[in-house]
Image (tube, helix red, strand yellow):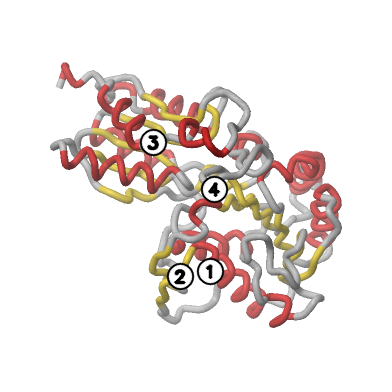
Amino acid sequence: MTSTAVEHETLSTAQAINRALRDALAEDPTVLVLGEDVGALGGVFRVTDGLTAEFGEDRCFDTPLAEAGIAGFAVGLAMNGMRPVIEMQFDAFAYPAFEQVVSHIAKMRNRTRGRVELPLVIRVPYAGGVGGVEHHSDSSEAYYAHTPGLHVVAPSNPADAYLLLREAIASPDPVVFLEPKKLYWAKGEVAFRAGAEPGIGRAVVRRPGTDATLIAYGPSVPVALEAADAAARDGRSLQVVDVRSIVPFDDATVCAAVESTGRAVVVAEASGFASVASEIAARVSERCFHSLAAPVRRVTGFDIPYPPPKLEHLQLPSVDRILDAVDDLQWEDA
């Protein structure tokens, strides 16, 4: 990111991502945007709206409905000096591309002893809360986080969506950029300058607190903040940490926050078994053991296929489920 001018604007998350793509396309002729319906239609969520009209069909264009082909095409583009930004239309639509992602995108730098970089971004609209059915509401972050060679980020607000995507596009290594669908229409102030928010690899304390720490990322951050508001009305002070960058993970910020309160709850939409939430709970338990007053709790989706729209409210972490977990943090010893 080369611009240092201070500029602010109120945008939705979808608009912030669109602005990040537009600014990157304008500043760097090697940036390309491609995927299913990202061209004239502007994407099913209109995230790429207007980019083809402004930059032409050579810079933002549609692909066949073939996710493995999209990812493989991006590998070739990146190996030859371009910076492709590819869109997987929905979270679970990306699974056919896994062979390209795991076997080639993630491994190219190591395979070539650092001689070949793959500066590409995989945009994935992910998670639930929009009334979608299976294949449209998956929280697939654990698959990517478990694959060495990938960076994985999940913004929770429009400002982070803009800045993390600009950093992802500028990165010399592949980045999986997870876009919480239910936050596409959430609005907030966006600063279009470097340093307005910490970059990839850094977590942020979104709300201070003294009694317990809620650790969340992506779509679960607003729910955690809502839970902290509710707890405050009952006289309990909850701190909220936004992980932002799943890989690399910011142990220092997360552990400092947990050590300051002595109690922690990890909140995530994905199923809990063998999940990112499980990894966070393990890391906090190992590193903060002597500061913990209670075992680390997790509030996650259940270990089931994603339910139909009428039942998804039971699957997603809620304020009540978070507060129940907080109540279980052995307050009798306080």
Front tag of 3 and 2: 3
Q: Describe the element under mark 2 as helix, strand or loop.
A: strand
Report the amino acid beneath label 4.
Val
Tell me where residue 295 sits by quadrant: top left
**Label 2, on which residue?**
11
Residues at marks 3 and 2, CA–CA distance in whole angstroms: 26 Å
Q: Earlier in the sequence, mark 2 or mark 4?
A: 2
Residues at marks 2 and 1, CA–CA distance in whole angstroms: 6 Å
Report the amino acid beneath label 3.
Ser
- Residue at image point 67% right, 60% down: 44
Q: Is residue 268 above or below residue 45?
A: above
- Is residue 106 visible in the rendered image? The answer is no
Front tag of 4 and 1: 4
Residue 40 x %, y %:
75, 73
- Front residue (pair 223, 152): 223
Residues at marks 3 and 1, CA–CA distance in whole angstroms: 27 Å
Front tag of 3 and 1: 3
